Image: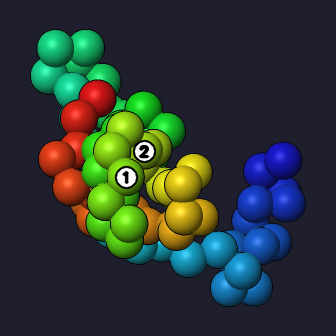
Amino acid sequence: SEYIYRQLKDNYHIATRKITQFFDPEKEMFLADRFIKGTCPKCKTEDQYGDNCEACGATYTPAELINPRS
């Protein structure tokens, strides 16, 4: 697996970038998109996951959610 990773990285198929990662201080852990819920920024449906809206099908980042929570 290390060999495959190196080949992909060396041939520019893997990129490194900085992202904003949500952190829950009560659980003391960083949160994946699916562990964050909030209001959809597109259709305003509440209680949607941090990566897509089940009501309108929009995709977004957790930072775009309205009132995000874990």
Q: CA–CA distance between discs 2 and 1?
A: 7 Å
The 10 Å Cα crowd at callout 1, few under 14, some 14 to 19, many 20 or more, is some
Left or right: where 46 falls relative to 67: right
Residue drawn 74% across and 65% down? 6
Residue 3 coordinates in the image, percent (x, y): 84, 57
> How many discs appear?
2
- Image point 21% across, 55% down: which residue? 66
Residue, disc 1: 45
**Res. 9 image quadrant:** bottom right
Quadrant where the C terminus is found in the figure: top left
Residue 62 image point, x, y percent: 34, 55
Labels 2 and 1 touching (C-beta < 8 A): yes
Query: Which structural element holds mark 2?
Result: strand
Above or below for 44 versus 16: above
Task: Give the percent coordinates (x, y) of residue 10.
Answer: 71, 79
Whether 19 is drawn above or below 30: the answer is: below
Q: Residue at x 37, y 52 (%)?
A: 45
